[in-house]
Amino acid sequence: MFYLSVFFQYMAQYMKTKLQYRADLFVEWLSDLMAQAVNLIFLLVVFRHTPLLHGWSRDEMLFIYGFFLVPYAVFAAFFNLWDFNERYIVQGEMDRVLTRPVHSLFQVVLERMELESLLGAVPGLVIMVYAGSRLSLSFHWYDALMFILLVVGGAFIYAGIFISLATISFFADARTSIMPMMYNISSYGRYPVDIYHRVIRYILTWVLPFAFVGVYPASYFLRKEEWYGYAFFTPVVGALFFAIAVMLWNAGVRRYRGTGS
């Protein structure tokens, strides 16, 4: 209950701050929407020249892309750690965090919260509905629960990977970060894995499992037999990677000596 109370206090303060700058909020959302539109246009251009891509139709690819946007939006809203090294390690903000009687990762997550990123899920849902209607997909009542489970699992995969990357800052003095490169790699998860070389396919499944964020869970709804079973591993992989990330974080905090030492 204590952590839940802290969460709502942070959220209330966040909303007060953001509502004071509504124009900035709109510009940020519009910028994200334009970036998603560029990716969508790219897909549409590709399928103007070919009806199928390794057995995947245009509408199936659109459905995968739409699904991919939803867990990504959840991740971006709650695990925005791209500048963790610069802000918390180099500038010494971690010293302040560690003086409070709340888990340090929980604090950092709340301080970097960007709830407006959740709006990025709206275009994803719209694209899924559009593609699903064209594909005449049928759904059961339990598919809604499965959708939530797969979205949370996908968001936890993202969070686990990027929290693990953030913990490198506890062990290395360099200011450089590999997070921008990892963001680029994560985009591979929005396309079917069988369009890649088998080495890349293996990496996207078992090393950097971004395929469990997009194509595998989407295959559950598309009823793609070859990848259908992988969808059920999404929550497991998400929980595993997130647990590993928390352990790495705790180990990093124990090693942290502050900016003055």
Image (cartoon, rainbow, N blue to C red):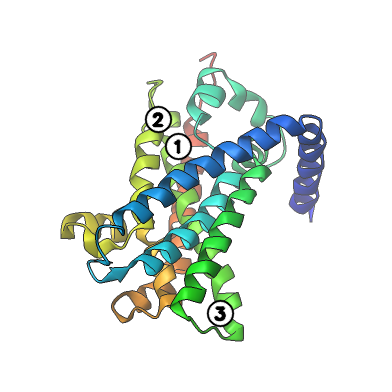
Contact, CB < 8 Å: mark 1 with mark 2? yes
**Foreground residue, 215 or 94?**
215
Q: Which mark is nearer the camera, 3 or 2?
A: 3
Q: SS for tag 3?
A: helix
Q: Give left or right: position of 205 versus 80.
A: left
Q: Which mark is residue 143?
A: 3
Q: Amino acid at mark 2?
A: Phe
Quickly name the residue at label 2.
171
> Which is nearer the N-term, disc 3 or disc 1?
3
- Give the mark, 3 or 2, whose residue is nearer the N terminus: 3
Query: Can you tell which of label 1 and label 2 is closer to the viewer?
Result: 1
Q: Is residue 79 visible?
A: no
Circle 3 crowding by C-alpha within 10 Å: few under 14, some 14–19, many from 20: few
Pick out the residue farthest to the front.
48
Residue annotated with mark 1: 167
Q: Residue at x 48, y 81 (%)?
A: 137
Q: Dot 2, how many residues are within 10 Å of its Cα: few (below 14), some (14-19), or many (20+)?
A: few
User: Within the image, what quadrant is residue 193 found in?
Assistant: bottom left
Cα separation, mark 3 vs mark 1, equals 36 Å
Q: Residue at x 66, y 39 (%)?
A: 107
Amino acid at the residue labelled 3? Asp
Expressed as whole percent of the image width and height from the top left, the position of residue 218 reads 43, 69
- Helix, strand or loop at mark 1: helix
The picture quadrant where one finds residue 197 is bottom left
- In the image, residue 260 sits, relative to residue 166, either above or below, namely above
- Residue 51 place in picture, x, y as percent: 27, 67
Q: Locate residue 101 relative to residue 234 in the image: left or right.
A: right
Label 1 crowd (10 A; few <14 / some 14-19 / many >=20): many
Q: Is residue 247 above or below residue 238?
A: above
Residue 238 in view (yes/no):
yes
